[in-house]
Amino acid sequence: MPDLTATHVLTTDAVRWGIETLGLRKLHPTFVVYLYLRAKARSGTLSDASATSDELLSLIRMPGNPRKPYYFPLISRGQRADGLLHTFWRAPNIAGSWSPGSIHRQQSGAWLGTEDGEYAMPNDHTELAFNQMLFGEPVSALALGAYFLRNDGFVLTGTPTPEDLVAGFRVKFDFPSEAEDDFQRLFTSQGPDDDFAWFEKYPQSTVELNAEEETDV
């Protein structure tokens, strides 16, 4: 069997760029729940989905704030500026707003929940997500990957490239080649103008962007 021991992790520069890029544009916060539920639906386990699942909450869990354990750079309103904003910190009760009943009452993303308190994934979910969560503009898969895969290990050979991060994002959220149309509708592979190292060899120092409470990271 092949050796699947992690060889690389993302650099702090990559994670920081991902957060800053996501924070500068309008994105519905429920988009991360959509990605989680979509993957569950594709695997036939949508009925097992839970807003308190570690699979979901680990995507946004961040050390550094004793009262707000989640750090979430997807915002649809409020302050936008360069840098890592203290307003990205979220309180422990965020999972409550992602339960099926709560989502069903939202203006955008109501189609992810039913009146019966169950999650749903309608056939036209890609268009609904594009219009109601991305507001008609594809989002960078590199930026999403840089944040949501910040704690993941990568098995890479040769010189790592940004394409390796996009590939990792596609695996994590189940966008194989047969889902190419969905991927192209929702995402771009747009990267930064600045040149920096995306990966460093593992083990290295853990990628953590800690912050004092109510201060920028």
Image (spheres, rainbow, N blue to C red):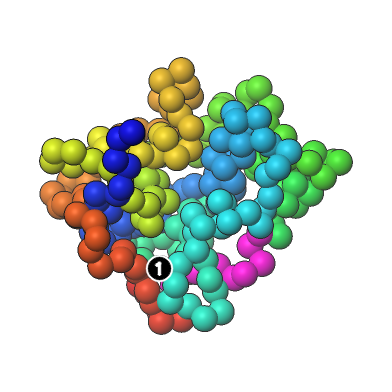
Image quadrant of residue 1? Answer: top left
Number of numbered discs on residues? 1
Residue at 56% of width from left, 51% of height from top? 55
Quadrant containing the C terminus in the rendered view = bottom left
Name above or below for residue 216 compared with residue 150. below
Where residue 202 appears, as percent x and y from the top left, is: 24, 56
156 and 36: which is toward the camera:
156
Where residue 44 appears, as percent x and y from the top left, is: 65, 30
Instruction: Give the dominant element type of the magenta stretch: helix, strand or loop.
Output: helix
Image quadrant of residue 118? Answer: top right
The kind of residue on which mark 1 rests is Leu
Magenta residues span 86-95
Horizontal relation, residue 99 to residue 28: left or right: right
Horizontal relation, residue 99 to residue 77: left or right: right
Image quadrant of residue 45? Answer: top right
Where residue 57 appears, as percent x and y from the top left, is: 56, 57
Horizontal relation, residue 191 to residue 176: left or right: left
Check disc 1 and report the residue beneath it. Answer: 85
Residue at 24% of width from left, 49% of height from top? 7
> In the rendered structure, does residue 89 fall within the stretch colored magenta?
yes
Name above or below for residue 149 compared with residue 204. above
Residue at 50% of width from left, 63% of height from top? 61
Residue at 38% of width from left, 57% of height from top? 151
Query: Does residue 12 appear anywhere in the picture?
Result: yes
110 and 82: which is toward the camera:
110
Query: Does residue 185 appear anywhere in the picture?
Result: no
